[in-house]
Amino acid sequence: MAVDSIKVPAKKAVRRAGEKLRTPGLPDSETTDALQVLSDWRALYYRPINTIQALIRKKIDALNIKSAIVAQRLKRTPSIVAKLKRYPSMQLDRMQDIGGIRAVVNNVDEVFKLHQSLVRGRHKHSPVIPEKNYIANPKADGYRGIHQVFKYSTSQHEELEGMLIEVQIRTKLQHYWATAVETLGVIEKSSFKTGIGDEKFKQFFRVCSALFSIREKQPIIECLREKSPKEIVQEFLQLEEELGVFDKLAAFTSVVRATSGVENKKSNGYYLLILDTDKKITSFIPFASDQPQLAEQMYMLMESKEKNNPNIDVVLAAAGDMKDLRTAYPNYFVDTKAFITNLKTICSEILAS
């Protein structure tokens, strides 16, 4: 899709739209106009995000990393608006994660190898330094991974120059943890990811993070560093018994089904994923790689239609194929089997040691 074929909003207009969207009590007409500007701005990310994703795949091949999953998504409108409200000084046109790419690899060594290859590689997209290393320093909620922002560079489309793309690089264990947090958030209708929700559930995920850190021989979350591995297991077992997290996740997983007329679409296209937590159905609408504008229009339409429905969660994502998409975004298919299985194994090994 040529950039000329879509509306390119001025950055001043994008900033004004961001200010309006964080303003409480805005008239409906102004909100609608601001959301349209946001959608037009978000649509510009297709070229930069596709370019950076191709670069990541090239690096993965060069490093001979096997079984890696690479996927991309455009940040959901409710998440963008919530972030603008959370950070009053943030400008919409400088938000770093509207276009996001996720690379899931097998172990921590591969995370660092891929990150260094991207940062030091010969390409024109400059990294924003320093990166956010949440493996060496896990977030207070237990999140781990490396986040690296790149400034997109192009000689063909001046309006895209300097657009920011966030790359998240995680191990599989780190990925299982992050998506389980989102999945339980959907079930409990709490945004644990942004710090909202019951403190006991949040502590459960801190403990899970520590267990995965122990398995990967990496620093654990600061609040648990004084405890021994066996003490962490005991706290995990007590919280799991009290909260019944595994039962909640397993029960929800068993009744979710994906529906679509096209199960095995060709790779390199887009999927509009719609999770209905009330009916327990995940549906998806596939788009070809040359249909980003249509995909964005449908994305905005679905977001607008379901904006007052707490049971509907919508995201526009892309991956190599449906199998990769399920692995990269298991929270939209409510698949947490790997999360549960790995935690049980780690606990058994620590208690037996």
Image: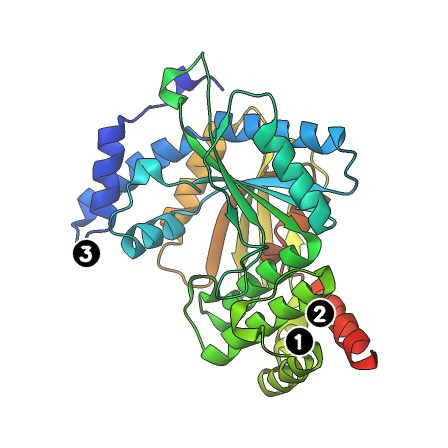
Seen as rendered, the residue at the extreme right is: 352
Q: Are marks 2 and 1 in contact (CB under 8 Å)?
A: yes
Q: CA distance from mark 3 to mark 2?
A: 41 Å
Q: Which of 23/30 is in front?
A: 23
Asked which secondary structure carries label 1, the reply is helix
Q: Which of 53/310 is in front?
A: 53
Asked which secondary structure carries label 3, the reply is loop
**What residue sits right under mark 1 in the picture?**
246
Q: Position of residue 169 (x, y in %)?
A: 61, 45
Instruction: Determine which quarter of the picture holds residue 264.
Output: top right
For the image, the number of numbered tags is: 3
Question: Upstream in the sequence, badge 2 or badge 1?
Answer: 1
Amino acid marked by disc 1: Phe
The quadrant in which the C terminus is found is bottom right
Amino acid marked by disc 2: Ile
**Circle 2: is it few (<14), some (14-19), or many (20+) Cα within 10 Å?**
some
Instruction: Determine which quarter of the picture holds residue 138.
Output: bottom right
**What residue sits right under mark 2 in the picture?**
340
